Structures are given as structure tokens and as C-alpha cells.
Amino acid sequence: MSEQVLGYLKENREQLLTKLNDFLAIPSVSTDSVHKNDVKEAASFLEKYINDIGFDHVEQQDTGGHPVVYAEYNQAGPDAPTVLFYGHYDVQPVDPLDLWESDPFQPEVRDGRLYARGSSDDKGQVFMHLAVFEAYMQTEGKLPLNVKVCIEGEEEIGSENLYKVLQEKQDQFQADFAVISDSGMIAQNQPTILYGLKGFTGIEINVTGPDHDLHSGMYGGAIRNPLMALSHIIVSMKNEDEVITVDGFYDGVEPLTEEERKLIADVEGEDYKASAGVKETASEKGYTAKEHTMARPTFEVNGMYGGYQGEGTKTIIPSTATAKITCRLVPGQDPERIQERLEEHVHKVAPAGVTVDVKKEKLSAKAYKVEPNHPLIKSAAKSYTKAFGKETVYVRMGGSIPVVEWIEAIYNMPIVLLGFGTPDDRLHSPNESFPLDSFDKGMETLVYYWKEVTQS
Amino acid sequence: MSEQVLGYLKENREQLLTKLNDFLAIPSVSTDSVHKNDVKEAASFLEKYINDIGFDHVEQQDTGGHPVVYAEYNQAGPDAPTVLFYGHYDVQPVDPLDLWESDPFQPEVRDGRLYARGSSDDKGQVFMHLAVFEAYMQTEGKLPLNVKVCIEGEEEIGSENLYKVLQEKQDQFQADFAVISDSGMIAQNQPTILYGLKGFTGIEINVTGPDHDLHSGMYGGAIRNPLMALSHIIVSMKNEDEVITVDGFYDGVEPLTEEERKLIADVEGEDYKASAGVKETASEKGYTAKEHTMARPTFEVNGMYGGYQGEGTKTIIPSTATAKITCRLVPGQDPERIQERLEEHVHKVAPAGVTVDVKKEKLSAKAYKVEPNHPLIKSAAKSYTKAFGKETVYVRMGGSIPVVEWIEAIYNMPIVLLGFGTPDDRLHSPNESFPLDSFDKGMETLVYYWKEVTQS
């Protein structure tokens, strides 16, 4: 019954890839105002394509920033479920350009991979969905379910405007469930259900000592050094066992069940040592590296600075010191509560002689977790396995996708993460690519999935 | 007997100040190659002036960098002592220029102070010596003692070439004692004998974790964070009581005697809180802030950095982290030994999962201390008091003047630091200035001093 649809994709593979290349050739770098018109062009490309496919309605929504491409297909009728499909058409900058082996905006196939900025994150994956919709329309004359499309142009710069849109247009975006393809599989050809993502929050600590940099000969021994004070604060927050020592930080954290530990142990995880280039991993006492990254909260100093950074020596006591800290959270942790705990801790341990200010990161998100047994998830696993010919594995990941938490919080609907990227895609780096094999099997998965969810 | 000399200085004050202004107007910024010819011009100014005064010999010595102005006056005869006078004619850069109230190279008098880059450090003080020599020659027809002059052009960039010259030309520079006027008094009009300076050494700690910045969602919980590791190392080196906890750091440190503590307590010290803009001072447990800055070794983190420093948030585990550390040393401490102790300590406490590299600062110096009862020092105190009309105080200072240690180490001769600067001179900062009152009284002090040392 899906044969016709799959046949269409096979017969039209060349044309579809050419069309994808046209899409990838548009340098829709959202962070760079030089590319403002390119971002707009990518939105218009999508608007035209979705219109050509035969959706009932398609529009570019003004957000104050780059537009959201919104579309509706209602012809499956009131009894069919409605899915909200989310993706993004903006891409990361390409610097450093000289590390690219081919032009990031002139897609090129090498060794079975399509090299271009956005090929995996996320234009390639967005295009796969649209191609599958096209195939359904061209063969069966309709889609198996009603569809709402939301493709934004600001994911790589924080999605702040999308957050407003999602809050303001609740009637428009409401659906029975949501599907997002902006993630990956744990290995190429290893179907992967991502059933948990971490939440996210952060603070910036600013320590101020003297009101200007001081000569260390004139003042050394009389004045508290802000870098030293900041180091004391930082060290008091996580110990050498990688246990976070901030009072209340672990409150409410769901304990890891034996079942989940087994699920994690069974996953063929990243070879952390090889890919990070370190001799030893370092994880929370009592947990493996995989358990910690996938399912335990983390605390990282992302940046720290103060004083002299040039060549040689400058004998000063610096006036200020700064640390940027983010935490990845698990279910049971509330980002705002965590920020408060961190702030309280910092003020409690700050040594005398300096003043300390804590800035709270505005864009926080709770963790996301869906029941691995949910029917929508089971259908996804079944479709993956059918397309890739391999058992699907279930993983939680250490990363955060804020839009996932927003959709869950605002719309209270289940979210299915259907990712087709691979660990070698080099997202955000030079030489981003996507395997053509994942392109084919990913589309096949989607063809099965839309049938599965409408039949179950 | 000194009346004639003092009279000459008084009568010719206008001409001397005009000449000083010509000297200050030359932008002899040694660190900036744009000013290479200006630095040379300042050397030539000195060469001509010293020649005009009537020295036997004057030359510009090639150092590979900016020249050393070397001169000899031998007419006092074989029975008179010989002094080596050291100073420098190069100045600090003037940035930020817009904070200057008048052009740094167009000297201007406001409220009894001469504003110009180098007015205090050290062109003004060098000029005072030459003016006094001129006054002696013009009135008495000779100087009271034999003089060797060494005025370098690279003090503000580390004096590396001077160090070579001092080592290579030992016969030339040898004298009975040395006089340096490149320091200050603890308050304007408060005659001050600086009888101790700290030594100096440093290390740079480089911590490397992963071989590239990592995504904190993918790797957080598996990889040791280099900034965290560096903070642990730093905190292990000095505790919150400001006690340095590096094994062997205090070995050999001369204990502070009750007599010295009294000497320090009697000194009207810097108001650290007011001038640094802090609410509380922080000093080594068991010592006052004055005792710690003046006479106890110190350990300061001068700079520290790693990871993201931009606006907002970047969720990475940084690849590297760096700390720049310098220590001020007291008599009994050997800089190289201290560097070894610091290095051993860093390697001992470095946590697993990172590699640590320690770079040792090349230009170190031992501390300097002279007996407050030395006849050359007593003569200085007497001359100061006579000129300023106030008892001379004896202080040790937290700063280091490497050339002092070199002259002591290479030539084994006593060194007298005759400083005339004041705490408000703003050395190395915008609006550097020097009180005209110190100019007059300082020259008066020198007139007395040369007589004193030849009579005692």
C-alpha cells in the first residue's frame, strides 16, 4: 500500500535531490544581517514548495525577526488526527570558511554524503518531510492525516520570536501531536528513538574587587583577588567527584531505575575518549559517563575570564572576574528553582572583600521525557525498523531543544522526535554533511510512519 | 657651602624647567616601534646635555634594542668615591589618550604639578640628577665625586638588553655604590628611604582537556572541564586566609622581627580601602595588610581565561584554560626554587582527565634589602630631612625593580634608592604628573647627598 509512494520517491530521486540542492544553496544564515534577504528567500522557497505540494493554506508569518513558514492541510477530514510538524530553515554561520573542502552553499556529493551547510541541520531533514508529503499527494492524491507546518528561521539564534508566536497563536498551532526532525541517531543506520532531552538553565557570575586593576606590588597582600575569589566560588559548586555541591540542586531528580540503566548500558554510545581526544573520562561518582551525559544533571563552566590575557606577564590584581555557567537538567528539576539555588549558593560562599553579582539566563527550559511505551513512539520504532532493517534503540540525550519544552508546556501534546542525522554530520562545523542513505531510509521511515499513526 | 649650588638651581629654575619640558615632549615610548626614532632622539638629548655639563666621556651604547646612554666623570680624582647613577628615558604608552586632560607630550603645569608622560617615571627624576650635576659644574667647577651614568631606554619593556650589557661590561659599570631615582615617597613631602623591595617570579598554567570545544549536551558529564580543573588547581595554592599552601613556598623566609613590625606600623601607609575602592582588605592570617604588602611574599592570579567570553551563552566544555600567576618574594626566597615548587604543586594536584603544562617566567628577580643603618643610607636620610624639613621614614615595598637585583647580584655594591615620586603621580596611567615642589626639594636633597657621601 505504501509501494506507490515509495516508488514515486525512488523514480523522482534525482529531481528531489536537485531541488534539495537549490534549497541548500540559499545561504540562510540567521545570525548575520548580511544574509537577511537570503533567509527570506529560503522562507519563500518553502512557501512555494508547500503550495505546489497542494496544502490548503501557506503563509509567511511576520515575527519581528525572520518569518515563520506556516501551512495547513485539512483534507484528511475531521476524523483523522492532526500533526504539527516543526523544523527550521535557518543555518549556522560557516566560519572558518577555509576549513571547508567544498563551498558550503554549493552542495556536493562525496563518498555517499551530501556536503553543504544545513544538509543535516535542519534543511535536509525539513526537505525530507516535504518530499514525502509530495509523494503522497502525487500518488494517493491526499495525505493520511491533517498537517500543520511550522518551519522557523531563528532556531540557530535562540527561537525567541517563535516562543512569542507559539504563545500568541495557540488556536492555530494546536494539534494532536507534534513531530520534530532536528536530531540524530546514535550511529548511522541505527534507528533511534530519542525519548528524553535535558532541560537547560544558566547563570553568569560577576565578581568585582577593586574599582580598577591594581599594581600587584603596591596592593598584593592587602586586596582580595577577584579571580581567586571566583575560583573559590566555582570549586565550591562541583567537587572532584563531579558531584554538584549546591544545596538542593538534586532535589526532585527522578532516580535512575535499574531498567533505565540497562537501557542506557545497551546503547552503543559515543566513544567519548576518542571523539573528545582525552585519556580519561570524568563522571559523577556512582554513574557511568553514558549515564551521566544521558540522564543525570550536569554543571559546566562554559567560559571564565578576568585580568590580563596577552603575551607574557602583567603584574596586576584584576578588578573583575566572570564565569559563565550552564546546567543541563533532568525531569523533576525546575530551571527557575535551580537558578535560585545557584544564586543563593554563590552569595553564601563569596569571600569577604569582593562583591558578587549573579545574572540569570533568560531562556531556560525544563527537561523533556516521553513514555517509551506511548503508541506514537511505538509506531515510530516500528517504522524506523521497517525502513532501516534493524531494531530501534531508545535513548535519552544530554542535549536540550528548547522548542520541545515550549510545545509541551504551551500545548500539552505528545512530541515525537524523528531524527535522521548521524554522529559524523559535523553540525555547526565546517564540512557539514548528511548521508544520502539516511535521506532515502529516512523518507521511507516517514512514509511508513504517517500510515502507522493513522491506522493505530 | 652648598648655597652657591642651590642658588644656581633657583636662579635658573625657568630655563631648567623649559629644558625638562623639551625632554618630556619627546614621545619616547619604548614598546611601540612607531616611536623608535623618538626613543633615539631622547637618548641623543641626554647625550648632548651630559656632554654640555662637562662629563669626560659620553656615548650611546648599542644594545640590539634602544641604546643605553653611558657617561663618565672622573675629575674628582682617585680618592673620591665613584657612584653609578641608573635611570631610564623611555616611557609607558599613553592609551587611552582621550582620558588625558592635556596632551601627554605637551607638558603643562596645573595646581603646582607638571603634567606629562614621564614627568615622574622616570624622565623627570633623571633630569633632576643632571640639573644638579650642571649646577655643581657651573658653580664649583667640579662634581664632589666620580660619576658613571647609565640611562637605559627599555625599562618599560623589561630591560632585557640592559641585563646583557650589565653582564658584558662589568669593568665599565663597576662603582662603589649605585643610586637609583625611579621610585617614590609614601606621601608628598614625606622623605622616605626604601630599604627593601620584593623579588619577583611567575608561572603560566595551561590546562588542556578535550582537543576541541565540546557541546555540553553531548559531552557534559563525561569529560573533565578544564576551567573547573584549573579552578581546583588555583584554589589549592592559596586558601581563604590568604596563606599560600604550596609546599615549601615559605622556606627560608626571614621572619618579621618585632622591630620591623613596629617600623611598618609607624609608616603612614596607603589607605588601601579608599584607593582600591573595596570595603574590606584581605591579608595573610596573622599579618596586617601593610605587613603583607611590604614584607611578606604574595601570590596573585594576574589573568585567567578559557572558553566563551561573548554576549549571552555558549554551551561548551572548553578545550583549554589558562592562568597567569606571579609571586612577589622576600629575602630568603629563591625565584627559581619557587618556580619549581609551584610547578611540582600544579602537577601534584591536577585532576585526572586533563593535561597540565607549566611555563616559567624568564625574568625573575630576588628580593632586595639594605641595612637601614648603612652609612650611605644614613646620609640619604639626613639629606632628605634637611631638604624637606621632616623626619625620614624607612619602608620596604611590595614592588620589584629587577635592575636593582641585577646590579646587586652582578656588582655586589650597595644600592641607594632615592625616590621623589608621590602616590598621586599616576604612573603608567593617563594624566601622569609630578609636583614641582618635589622637583625643587628633590634636587636640593641631591645637592646635599653628594656632599654628605663624600664627607662621611
Image: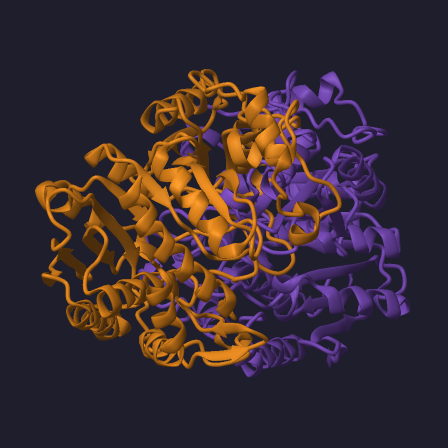
Chain colours: A purple, B orange
Viewer-proximal residue, B71 or A309? B71
Query: Residue A349 location in percent, x, y?
Result: 75, 33
Q: Residue at x 65, y 22 (%)?
A: B286
Q: Is residue A51 left or right of residue B146?
A: right
Quadrant position of residue A69: bottom right
Query: Residue B444 location in percent, x, y?
Result: 41, 60
Q: Is residue A340 left or right of residue B4?
A: right
Give the position of the C terminus of chain A as an image quadrant.
top right
Q: Residue at x 38, y 66 (%)?
A: B6
Count all numbered tags in the image, as a single digit.
0
Res. A234 visible in picture: yes
Query: Residue A379 location in percent, x, y?
Result: 72, 42
Q: Residue at x 27, y 52 (%)?
A: B86
| In this view, B266 is above or below A292 | below
| In this view, B351 is above or below B4 | above
Quadrant position of residue A77: bottom right
Query: Residue B438 location in percent, x, y?
Result: 49, 62
Viewer-proximal residue, B410 or A388? B410
| In this view, B21 is above or below B437 | below
Q: Residue furthest front?
A: B1
Viewer-proximal residue, A311 or A192? A311
Res. B226 visible in picture: no
Viewer-proximal residue, B34 or B53? B53
Q: Residue at x 39, y 36 (%)?
A: B200
